[in-house]
Image (cartoon, rainbow, N blue to C red):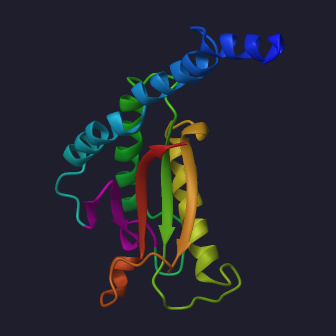
Amino acid sequence: MNRWKLAAVVVALMPGYGITGPTTSAAIAQTAEDPARYRAEFFGKLSQALAGQRDVQIVGDRFVIQSEVLFQSGAAVIQPGGEKLLAIVARQLVEFSARIPKSANWVLQVEGHTDSTPISNSLYPSNWELSSARAIAVVKYLNSIGVPNERLVAASYSQYQPLSSIDRARNRRIELKFTNR
């Protein structure tokens, strides 16, 4: 082994470099600030704040809001009752996020879902556009209440992630997921 290769191996093994250095330190710090640490607490607080709300439930690691609570059929404009519900979510998120380290790598992913009934009109040529527009409307509303844009993601699943093969109404929903960026 020539001296340059030997020097590279020695440096890689030194504390603060290579194998045991910044890469490992960054991984340990990232684990300590993993959003999973905060997800359960945030969802617990949100559950308390939304207690008694119809058509809102926790399914696994996400909050599920039935579309009818937020939108009229085939539309992506948030109704006043939906604004009230989302204002509760935004206030809880803004308050809770103040306790999360700034370096934590988290976002609130807002997912739009539709049922399998095809839509085709001048605004929404398909369910993709409708589910996208709804997710974006929720993201914009949460931002208007104070949730920073860099902590929001809009995702669209159209009809391709159904909750039920029998009850189409269950498939029309917005899901909120506290996750990694």
Across and down, in percent, residue 96 comes to 36, 31
* Front position in the image: 169 or 156: 156
Compared with residue 2, is residue 163 higher up or lower down, i.e. above or below?
Answer: below
Residue at 68% across / 79% down in the picture? 123
Residue at 30% across / 91% down in the picture? 166
- Which portion, as a residue range, is magenta? 55-71
* Front position in the image: 166 or 25: 25
Residue 57 within the magenta-colored segment of the rendering: yes
User: Could one spot residue 101 in this view of the protein?
Assistant: yes
Across and down, in percent, residue 86 comes to 40, 51
User: Could one spot residue 76 in this view of the protein?
Assistant: no
Residue 148 within the magenta-colored segment of the rendering: no
Across and down, in percent, residue 64 comes to 34, 62
Q: Residue 168's quadrant in the figure?
A: bottom left
Compared with residue 57, is residue 104 higher up or lower down, i.e. above or below?
Answer: above
* Front position in the image: 54 or 179: 179
Quadrant holding the N terminus = top right
Residue at 34% across / 88% down in the picture? 165
Q: Is residue 145 left or right of residue 162?
A: right
Residue at 63% across / 83% down in the picture? 126
Q: Is residue 12 left or right of residue 48?
A: right
Compared with residue 13, is residue 46 higher up or lower down, i.e. above or below?
Answer: below
Q: Residue furthest front?
A: 1
